[in-house]
Amino acid sequence: MRAGVVVAAQPGVEDLAVRAEELGLHSFWVNDTPMVHGDPFVALSLCAKATSRIKLGIGVTSPALRSAPAAASGLASLNALAPGRIICAVGTGNTARRTLGMRPTTAARLENFTAALQNLCAGRSTEYREGDRVRDIRFLHAGAHVNTADPIEFVVAALLGPKAAAVAGRRGTGLISFGLLDPTAWHALHDTRRHAAQGTPRDLDSYTDSRADSYVVTSLHLLDEDEDPHGDAARDATGHLVLSLLAFAADTPAFAEQLGPEERKAVRQLLDRRGTTATAPDRHTKLYPNYLGRIAPQDRDLVLPSLMNTLALVGTRDDLLARITTLEQAGVDELLIQPVIDPPTEMALLAKLLT
C-alpha cells in the first residue's frame, strides 16, 4: 500500500513536504478548513516550489466554501507549479461548514461542483449558475497562468457513504475517507461506485487521468514492548481523531444517538467541558478551536478505547501490517496519516512500515 501524510496549512509546511518526499511518501495533503487552518492553496504553492516528485493534495474542498471558477483557478495554478502532481478532494464541506456554524451542502451540489472542476481544469467549458442566470464559462487564459494540459486527480469524500460513492462512480473519481478502517464498509463503497459507473456516458480521458484510487486518513501509533495500547502515548497520538468525532456528535444529535452509552457520555462530557450545548447557536466557536490539533492532557479520558480502535491504527508492527493488508484487500490504495505529536518522526515510521 502507498503512504502519504495530511497536515494543517501553516508557515513551514513546505519543510514537512520536503521531508515527506525524502522519505519516499507518495502524497502530501493539507486541509481546507478556513476557520481553523491556513489556506491550502498558499501552503501547497510553497510545497510545489520546494519539491519535485511528491503528489500534493487539497482535502477536502467544497462548493459550500469556494465557487467552481475560484477553486479551478487555484488548482490549475498549482498544476502550473507542479505539473501532474495535484490531487483535489471534494466533499459536502462537513467540518469546514460546521466550523462556521452552518450545515454541509447536498450530494447533488457536490456532483455539479465536481463536474465543473473536472471540466474547467481540463480546459473545457462548463455551466455556471448564479440565481436564474446561467452561462457557459471556461478559462480565457492558459500557458504561464494555469496548466490545463496535465491531469489533476479528483477524489470524493465518502462522508455521505453510498451517495458520495455514487457521485465518485458517475464522475470517474476516487474516494477518500476519514477514519474509515472497516474493510466491509470499503467493499460496500467500491461496489456502489462501480454500480454507479456502469452505463454512465463520459469521456474520462478528456478531463482526468481515469484513475479511481481510494485513500483513508487515520493516525498511526506503533506500540513499544509491553506498552499499554490505551495508555497516554497512544491516546495522545490518536486523540485528535477521537475528539473530532466527538465534536461532530456533539454538533449532530441524530448521530450521537447512534453511539453506544459510553460514547454518548463522552459527548456530554465534551459539551460540558467546552461550556456549550448541542443546540447553542454559537456551539461551533466552542467545539472546534484546535480542531485536529494535539489534545490537552485533561481530555485524555475522552479518548475511549472503542473509538481509538475504530478510527486509528494502534498496535505492534505485525498488528498494524495485518490491519493495513486487510484494508488493501478491500481496495484502499493509500494510507494517509495525520500526525500531531512529532510529524517528522511519525512520517518516518510510516515510511519504514510501508515503503
Image (tube, rainbow, N blue to C red):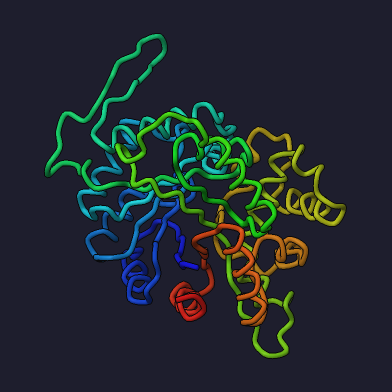
Residue at far bottom of view: 225
What residue is shown at x 66% (from left), y 46% (from top)? 248
Front residue (pair 96, 125): 125
Q: Position of residue 159 (x, y in %)?
A: 60, 43
Residue extending furthest left? 144
- Residue positioned 56% across, 44% down in the render: 95
Which residue occupies 70% across, 35% down?
280
| Left or right: where 109 falls relative to 43 | right
Q: Nearer the viewer, residue 128 or 175?
A: 175
Residue 243 place in picture, x, y as percent: 66, 57
Residue 237: name its quadrant. Answer: bottom right
Q: Decide which of 239, 36 is in the foreground and name it.
A: 239
> Quadrant location of residue 19?
bottom left
Location of residue 199 with respect to 213 vertically, above or below: above
Rendered view: 289 above or below 252 = below
- Tag count in the figure? 0
Residue 320 image position (x, y, % from top left): 63, 75
In the picture as drawn, the residue positioned furthest to the top comes out as: 132
Residue sitting at the far right: 261
In the rendered image, which quarter contains the C terminus? bottom left
| x then y, percent, for residue 155 | 45, 46
Compared to residue 57, the image places residue 147 above or below, namely above
Q: Quadrant of residue 330?
A: bottom right
Residue at left offset 77%, top offset 44%? 256
